[in-house]
């Protein structure tokens, strides 16, 4: 089954800890592994977005909103930390 690309309204953030969020696609049930798109972790450099489909494409963003946007907009590259 082909699922349309994730959109902004499909994103749900689940708080894992005080500095980590699981990024989920709300179109899938919480217990469905396909729901998990990646994780965001706040660190000293900013908000690190790690997509599960391509962990090497990890990027650091200046805000939680920017890190979240990187999961639904494949062309999104900023604002990042500038590196």
Image: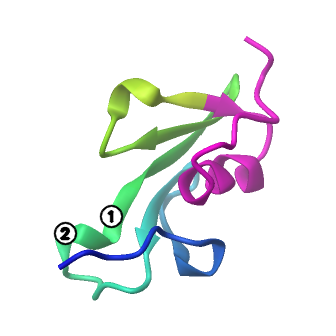
Label 2–label 1 contact, CB within 8 A: yes
Query: What mark, if any, has residue 33 been given in the picture?
Result: 2
Give me the residue at 48% from left, 29% from top: 58
Q: Which mark is residue 63?
A: none
Q: Residue at x 53, y 75 (%)?
A: 12
Q: In which quadrant of the rendered view does residue 83 lie? A: top right
CA gap, disc 2 to disc 1? 6 Å
Q: Which residue is mark 1?
A: 36
Q: Which residue is at the front of the view, 72 or 46?
A: 72
Residue 35, percent from left and from top: 31, 72
Please identify the quarter of the rendering in which residue 33 is found: bottom left
From the viewer's perspective, is 38 left or right of 21?
A: left
Between 16 and 65, the one lying in front of the other is 65
Q: Position of residue 18 (x, y in %)?
A: 57, 55
Determine if the magenta segment contains residue 5.
Answer: no
Question: In which quadrant is the N terminus drawn?
Answer: bottom left
* Colour treatment of the image: rainbow
| Residue range of the region highlighted in magenta in the rendering | 60-83
Q: Tell which of 67 and 21 is nearer to you.
A: 67
Q: Is residue 81 left or right of residue 10?
A: right
In percent of width and height, residue 5 lies at 45, 68
Q: Residues within 10 Å of mark 2 (few under 14, many from 20)?
A: few
Q: Position of residue 28 (x, y in %)?
A: 31, 84
| Closest to the observer, 16 or 58 | 58
């Amino acid at each position: 089954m082909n699922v349309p690309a994730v959109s902004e309204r499909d994103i749900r953030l689940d708080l894992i800890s005080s500095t980590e969020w699981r990024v989920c696609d709300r179109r899938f049930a919480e217990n469905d592994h396909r729901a998990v798109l990646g994780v965001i972790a706040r660190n000293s450099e900013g908000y690190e977005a790690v997509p599960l489909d391509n962990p090497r494409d990890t990027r650091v963003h200046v805000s939680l909103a920017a890190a979240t946007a990187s999961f639904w907009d494949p062309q999104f590259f900023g604002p990042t930390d500038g590196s």
